[in-house]
Image: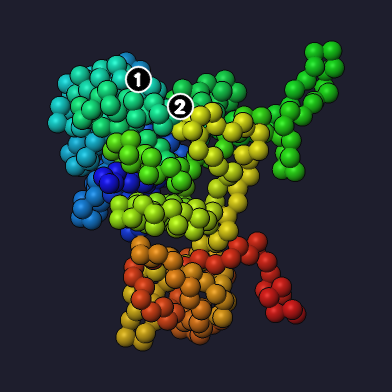
Amino acid sequence: MRIPELLAPAGNMDALRAALHFGADAVYGGMKHFGLRAFAGNFGPDELREAVRETHAAGRKFYVTMNIYPFDDELEAFGEAAKEAADCGVDAAIVADPGAIRFLRAKVPGLPIHVSTQANTLNAPAAELYRELGCERVILAREMSLERIRALKQKVGDGIQLETFVHGASCMAYSGRCMLSAYLTGRSGNRGECAQPCRWQYAVMEEKRPGEYLPVAEDERGTYLFSARDLCLMPLLPELCDAGVASLKIEGRMKTEYYVAVVTGAYRRALDLLGKDREAFREALPEMTAELQCASHRLSDTGFLEGQPEKPGEAEGFWQSREYTAKVVGPEGPDGRARLLLKNRFYAGDELELMTPAGIRTIRAARFLREKTGEEMETLGIAGEIIRMPLPGCSEGDMLRGPVRNHRKDSDRTGN
């Protein structure tokens, strides 16, 4: 079976390094301007150059997001930014607007272009049009079913690559172009400034009963009329591979490095297993699906791939079954202790999980040294501190996690 590229989000350098460490074939990230995630960390010119350098050093690809819809008076700056990105060595630019695509083909002819999902590509003639414009890949609209993806692939053949989202948050305007944020807040989603009003609570008011608000769809967390469920296509990976999709994309440039590590690692292991033994993949599917629950997420479904998605109204609120505890920033030294960057409190004796590219391993936390003071400790609750603890078999970039503590006090632990 031909296994597609696994494409992971990189909202900043920490997320990029997590994506590379846990097995992404390629990453995508934005510059400070012209992308649709204005509030992600994004990359300045020097940061972009370093991001591309590290990505290429790992033998992977970096795609830069330039999927804003530019006005005429922005096109020159848009073109200059694309030139800067090309000079940094990016492997492609992700662009949405057809006019901007044609403009960049003339302005920066050597820069490969991928057509953003914001372009809402739903049919073969549209894909052929982008091929004629010189694009090498189309990121399909999220409204595509598996049957339609197969049919489109058969029509376009190898003339243009197809990419599809497999995991992450979805907005109510599934492939974008939503005007709700711009109307309610003045922050346009098509300009990278979405305020996510689809996640807000809403009610209806009857004309002759002013001030009387009637809930629409309610649970114990509130009323969420528009909030779409997250996407999770882990169970359908075999079908996507059979359909001939070239790249599987994880949403999440606003997500943490821990989220990127968990989701990228789970899909990497799933795809590797699928490439060797489809039956073994099926047997391991419950375990790999459970792994995705370890990172912060909403309720999920398979989107449009199997037909209409679940109705919204129950997708607000986040859950996760594990908490990010520490990151390995240096391997074991002469004293047999690894250097760890602390993220959340844990205690000596706790059962933790070591996240590695090869999989998850259970370990027992030991007493550790606080590098700042040299004192030996059983617990520490100061995020950002460097500690040293025995952790055999770890490597730089691995992560530790434990059960979600809900920020309980030390007295809860000791009984005092």
**Residue 119 in picture, x, y percent from top left:** 37, 23
Q: Is residue 284 left or right of residue 121?
A: right
Sequence-first tag of 1 and 2:
1
Q: Which disc number belongs to residue 123? A: 1
Q: In the image, is residue 251 above or below residue 77?
A: below
Q: Is residue 98 left or right of residue 292?
A: left
Badge 1, how many Cα within 10 Å: few under 14, some, many 20+?
A: some
Task: Specify the amino acid type for callout 2.
Answer: Glu
For the C terminus, which image quadrant?
bottom right
Q: In the image, is residue 191 above or below residue 362?
A: above
**Residue 342 in picture, x, y percent from top left:** 48, 68
**Residue 393 in picture, x, y percent from top left:** 36, 76
Q: Residue at x 68, y 66 (%)?
A: 408
Q: Which residue is mark 2?
A: 143
Occupied quadrant, residue 331: bottom left
Q: Nearer the viewer, residue 238 or 61?
A: 238
Tell me the element at label 1.
loop
Q: Which disc number belongs to residue 109? A: none
Q: Residue at x 39, y 54 (%)?
A: 279
